[in-house]
Image (cartoon, rainbow, N blue to C red):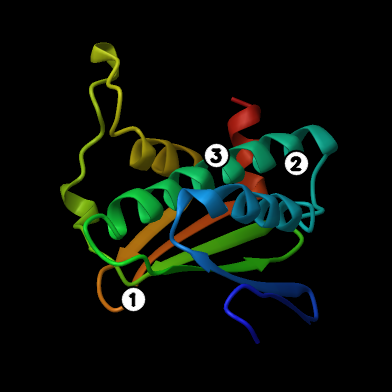
Amino acid sequence: MSDRSELLLDCGSVSLIHLQVPGSLKFRDLAIRVVAAACKLVTAGTAELRAEFDDQVISAFGEAFNNAAIHSYKGRPLGTVDIDIEVDASSITLRISDHGQSFDLAQIRDPDLDSLPESGLGLFIIRSFMDSVLYQAGAPNVLSMTKQLQAVAAGASQ
């Protein structure tokens, strides 16, 4: 398998997708398109709920990719970003891995939205839109994010 290949494995009711791209913003659109296509594999719920689900997952992923591309390899040789997507009828899990600079997720506080910050909103958006966000620093650094379609439905009924 080449460094820029996509692999889809259908394991019964769960699909696994892998994409590896250079850790550059030039490849952001490609990665987002793969995640958007994977969201279409989540088939539970109404079309309206799935549209909100898709928007939230794609927005959170875009922010996570930006962080990997902009911050992980800053001042370092360009590395790769691996994206693993696990999807079933009602949920999606995204794992974004890189070999760049790590950070402490627990130390990142929500921004002061009243001050209209120009940066620092990425993790806030990720945490707001995804049901579970975990980060493991190391070699590689891995950000894992999960979204359940039922959580979107619960939020819509409030």
The residue positioned 66% from the left and 75% from the top of the image is 5
Circles 2, 1 touching at the beta carbon (< 8 Å): no
Is 120 placed above or below 83 here?
Answer: above
Which amino acid is tagged 3? Answer: Ser
Q: Nearer the viewer, mark 2 or mark 1?
A: 1
Q: Is residue 93 left or right of residue 91?
A: left
Which amino acid is tagged 1? Answer: Pro
Q: Is residue 151 left or right of residue 10?
A: left
The residue positioned 65% from the left and 58% from the top of the image is 91
The answer to which of marks 2 and 3 sits earlier in the sequence is 2
Q: Quadrant of residue 38?
A: bottom right
The residue positioned 79% from the left and 74% from the top of the image is 13
Quadrant of image for the C terminus:
top right
Q: What SS does tag 3 mark?
A: helix
Q: Nearer the viewer, mark 2 or mark 3?
A: 3
- Label 2 belongs to which residue? 50
Mark 2 to mark 3: distance in Å? 14 Å
Q: What SS does tag 2 mark?
A: helix
Residue 102's x, y, as percent?
Answer: 23, 63
Is 150 placed above or below 110 here?
Answer: below
The answer to which of marks 1 and 3 sits earlier in the sequence is 3
Which amino acid is tagged 2? Answer: Arg
Classed neighbour count for the residue bearing mark 1: other residues with Cα under 10 Å, few (<14), some (14–19), many (≥20): some
- Label 3 belongs to which residue? 59
Mark 1 to mark 3: distance in Å? 23 Å
Residue 132's x, y, as percent?
Answer: 44, 54
The answer to which of marks 2 and 1 sits earlier in the sequence is 2
Q: Quadrant of residue 27?
A: bottom right
